[in-house]
Every structure is written in structure tokens, then in C-alpha cells.
Amino acid sequence: MVAYVVIPGIDGSDEAHWQSRWQQEWGGAAVRIAPGSWAAPELADWVAAVQAAYEAVGVAGEPVVLVAHSLGCWAAACWLEAVRPAGVAAFLVAPPDPRGPAFPRAAAPSFAARAARALPCPALVVAGEDDPYCDAGVSAGFAREWGARWESGGTHGHLNSASGLGEWPAGRALLATLVADAG
């Protein structure tokens, strides 16, 4: 059985967001991070929240998939770099460009200096070709630097609830390929 750590972006994911829909379906097999700094993200707080969620959902010997969106991708990457856990895979959707003009530097200054480094696990980056927070070429570059596979999320913007993805079946199919590849 696979367990999931759900890592939303700023302010969490609302109930219309694909992350929330998937989490509801997964039930007790999924835990959402709960940082104290949702609206004014602090990287250390978010990384600690990933650790707490991982500990809450993790079952010895069972695989864990980090399911991150937006700023949550950077929290996931930072946690993975620091902890280097075994049996984990990362599904990273719509990472924003910390150096891009739309990055929320004032709200999330501790995330602004992040750079992608090789991740210690199988990973898949999915990004919109018209994401206002990150050019598709930049997100593909993050994937290369993370050692991850990159997939286009089409022309659905930031791949959030405003994108109207609903259950996002295409995303579920991509997640299934990551889980299968991770073994």
C-alpha cells in the first residue's frame, strides 16, 4: 500500500483543488502538511511540517509519495535534500520560479533563494505550458536539476483549482506512472 504526504502551496489547497479531492479519496493513507505559516510561508516551518506529516503517515517498509503543488514543491525538495529518506517518490506539480517576476517574494522570502539540486528519489515534475508563475522551459530545467522526469500539464495555467481540472484524471495517470516506476 502507498501512503501520501500532501504538500499544497500558499494558503493550502481549497476543496475544489485536485490535491484535496485526491486526499479525500485516499482517506487515512494521506496526511496533509500543517505548517503554522500558510499565508506567510517560512521554509523551515514548511520543511518541519513535511517531516511531521511523513512521520504521521509513514508505515515501516511502505512507500510514501510526496504530492506537492506550487510552493509545496520547494518545501518537498528541501526536505528530501535534508532527510534523504528511503522508499519515497516525489510528484511535483507547478513549481514556481523563485527568480521569476511573479514569485511572491514579499510573502515567502525564505523560499526565494532556492535552487534545484539532485533529489535522492524518483520524481516527476508536471507543469503547465502557460503557468504564470513559471515558464515551461524553466520548470523543465528544474526537473533536469532535480533528476526528475518532466511532463507537460497542457495549457491549464498553474494547475490549481482555478484551472478547472476537477479530479484531474491526466494527473492521476501521471502519478500512477511515478508510483509504478518507483516500484
Image: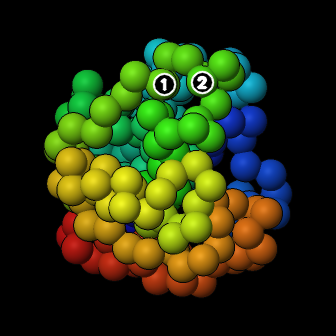
Per the rendering, the mark at residue 84 is none
Q: Nearer the viewer, residue 56 or 99?
A: 99
Residue type at mark 1 is Phe
User: Which residue shows up at 39% across the image and 56% down it?
Assistant: 139
**Circle 2 crowding by C-alpha within 10 Å: few under 14, some 14–19, many from 20:** some
Q: Please, is residue 140 above or below residue 66 in the view? A: below
Q: Residue at x 50, y 17 (%)?
A: 110
Left or right, 142 with respect to 74, comes to left
Residue under label 1, please give it.
111
Q: Residue furthest front?
A: 101
In the image, is 157 to the left or to the right of 83? right
Note whether 156 is above or below 137 in the view shown. Answer: below
Front-lying residue, 87 or 28: 87
What's the residue at 37%, 28% (across, down)? 114
Q: Split into 4 quadrants, where in the image is the N terminus? A: bottom left
Q: Quadrant of the C terminus?
A: bottom left
Classify residue 78 as left or right of residue 29: left
Q: Which residue type carries mark 2? A: Arg
CA neighbours of label 1 inside 10 A, class few (<14), some (14 to 19), many (20+): many
Residue ID for mark 2: 105
Rendered location of residue 163, percent (x, y)? 73, 69
State which quadrant residue 174 falls in.
Answer: bottom left
Residue at (58, 49) in percent of width and height: 133
Residue 57 locus on image (x, y percent): 48, 43
- Label 2 residue SS: loop
Q: Nearer the viewer, residue 117 or 57?
A: 117
